[in-house]
Image (tube, rainbow, N blue to C red):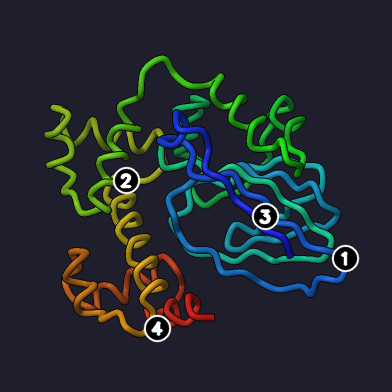
Amino acid sequence: MLSAEWAPAPLLQNYIHRYWVVQTGADFSSCTRQLYADGCINLIYNCGQSIVKTFPCNGLLKPGRLYIAGTATTPGTLERQPASCFIGIRFLPGGFHSLYGHPADGIVNVIGDFHEPELQMLLEPDDGLKERLDDFFLSKLPSSQPLLVQLVQEMRKARGQLAISRLAGLYNISTRTLERHFKLGTGAPPKEIANILRFQTAIKKLKSNGLNESLLRLSVELGYADHAHLSRECKRYAGLSPEGLRKAGLS
């Protein structure tokens, strides 16, 4: 199996997390991959020969089709099949809405067709893919950075540990206005996105430090009430216990 990912051009890095490619050969053995909630929206192009299933969205990703996978707030699974090839663009929370203007509140945890012929023509897994995507999305950059993107940046810097009232105060807006921006641009409440960002930090630490990471110490560091709270969040967003996440990192 071949997999690769690239960071976008610097000007796009507050909107897009990664471009990615996953490709399997004809002799690849089918398997299932666990997917974690990450608060991101993905555009996914199936340029292989296999139909792939996703759960819980129950999506069928058919060859030659471009799909949108809405904001992920729950764990899921993805089948990997022989002779498959997928190219994706993973948008940070609020990034897709800021570049396309499409509301995200109706596509949370949903996969559906996405019609963008100009983009689809660029999606070939060759050495020029990253540059083509950079050029395409740079042409979509708004003239000034949207408020939602700024709000998500603050959340990311705080690793999700920023009270929603405090975040609203930093930008002199009401919590109701802040919630409206998140609902339209991510489809999820700001507290949900903050929780997912904190959980993503926990995943990185559990996988990088493995068995040496103390759940109690990590819980305190990331602002969880206790290690039981951390365990519940792992189950909620990954479908795995902290021990399961450790093993996933060590395997």
Foreground label between 4 and 2: 4
Q: CA distance from mark 2 to mark 1?
A: 42 Å
Element type where label 1 sits in the image: loop
Quadrant, the C terminus:
bottom right
Residue 189 numbered tag: 2
Q: Which residue is mark 1?
A: 26
Q: Which residue is mark 3?
A: 59
Q: CA distance from mark 4 to mark 3?
A: 29 Å
Q: CA distance from mark 1 to mark 4?
A: 34 Å
Residue under the image location 41 percent in, 14 percent down:
143
- Image coords of residue 136 (percent x, y): 62, 25
Q: Tags 2 and 1 in contact by the CB under 8 Å rule?
A: no
- Image coords of residue 194 (percent x, y): 29, 51
Q: CA distance from mark 4 to mark 2?
A: 28 Å
Mark 2 or mark 1: name the one nearer the start of the chain. 1
Element type where label 2 sits in the image: loop
